Amino acid sequence: MIIATIVIIFFLFAALGMPIAFAMGMASLTAILVAGMDFMVLPGKMVHAVDSFPLMAIPLFMLAGQLMLRGGIMDPLIDFVNALIGRVRGGLAHVTVASAMLFSSVSGVAVADATALGGALGPALSKTYPRPFAASIVAAASCMGPIIPPSGAMIVYAVMAGNVSVAGLFLAGIVPGVLIGISMMGLCTYIAYRRGYPPTGDAFNWRKLVRETLRSIPIFLMPIIVIGGIIAGAFTPTEGAAIAVAYALLIGFFFTRKLKLADLPVALFNAAIVTAVVGALIAFSTTVTYLFTIERVADLIVEWFGSYTTSPYVFICLVMVALLVLGAFVEGNSLIIMVAPVLAPVALSFGLDPIYFGFLFVMNIVLGSITPPVGILLFVTAGIWNEPITNIIKAIWPFIVLLYSVLVLLVLVPDIFMFLPKLMGFAK
């Protein structure tokens, strides 16, 4: 009765346009009243859910990304990538992908990457390529934001799933992030030759490359210090996020000298909005998870899967297909918060490593941000380019196929991304 009430009420309010967080809250409240339970249990569960030290890393990493962006780090990053790639066919597309890889190592949020890349490279991309293709490159490349550490989505998953190492998830994202970037650059090269797009960029010059590398070193040091410190155990992810904020302030004020005191309120406000949204989702979803626990939903799912298969590989494939469908309709963080507490224990019952399952879970949901019809990055880039979203959907399909092909490869050959967590002792 409780489960049916939650499902019916949630989908009813969600279909009426109520924000996901409040739809979950209404569903849990209605289920408690129907079951005759004391509804005063909800406030305690909600407060306990958000009173979490690891969750503080999310607003801090978001704030660090905002400060780095407003501090003008995109210009030296783009100049470095231009110098590294040189003049090649499809060169500007390569610059976009490579810049996304570098910016992902300081932002951790796909929407932030898309906004930064669209603002910095949008005009040049629009002059060189058709606007839908330009927007699709930015949307697809921005998927690396939550995959390459630091990743806000991985932190949310680790908190919601419980007993999952954030550092281990960060390590798991390094190789796939690089693999995605290289694969996307290869696809851009193929498309550029096939469609006759012109070469872009200046001729390769060693002196220029050395100059731009030296100019960018302070920026490159941030992910090395922060991610390296977290992985080495020198500090926690939350402490690393605080260090990232301090480092971003130093970069913006004293290195690029583009960060102004007037930028701080806006950066803090944007970080606060993201924190409020994620916090509300976690608080309300915890009440649903509490009711699911009472009703033994995880045990029922295990029994259901067990009646069909005992193979962990069949289980992971079924989950990936389900997340592919759900990710096309539900925003990523919402989906992680709603589904991870239920499926993570089931994955453990099948003997799957928490980092293996967690990374594939997060990556699948991240790819949903470019999958029609509700991919958020499609709407972000459509707004930046003022382009009908249907045109961007038509242009982005080759990138969607490529990214899901990488996901399938990682499912079939887990050592590609698991060898680093195993090497550092975070997985067996």
Image (tube, rainbow, N blue to C red):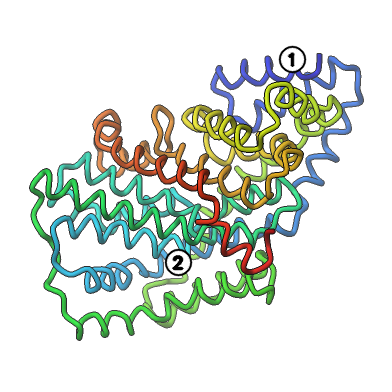
Q: Residues within 10 Å of mark 2 (few under 14, many from 20)?
A: few
Say which residue label 2 marks.
262
Q: What is the three-letter code of the residue carrying label 1? A: Ala
Residue at 81% x, 33% y is: 290
Q: Is residue 106 above or below residue 39?
A: below
Residue 150 lies, in percent from the top left, at 54, 61
Residues tagged 2 and 1 counted as in contact (Cβ below 8 A): no
- Foreground of the two, 39 or 4: 4
Q: Specify the quadrant of the image occupied by residue 161.
A: top right
Element under label 2? loop
Residue 206 lies, in percent from the top left, at 20, 83
110 to the left or right of 338: left
Q: What is the three-letter code of the residue carrying label 2? A: Ala
Q: Quadrant of the N terminus?
A: top right
Residue at 32% x, 62% y is: 98
Sooner in the amino-acid sequence: mark 2 or mark 1: 1
Q: Is residue 178 above or below residue 250?
A: above
Element under label 1? helix
Say which residue label 1 marks.
4
Q: CA distance from mark 2 to mark 1?
A: 50 Å
Could you tell me if residue 266 is visible in this image?
no
Q: Residues within 10 Å of mark 1 (few under 14, many from 20)?
A: few
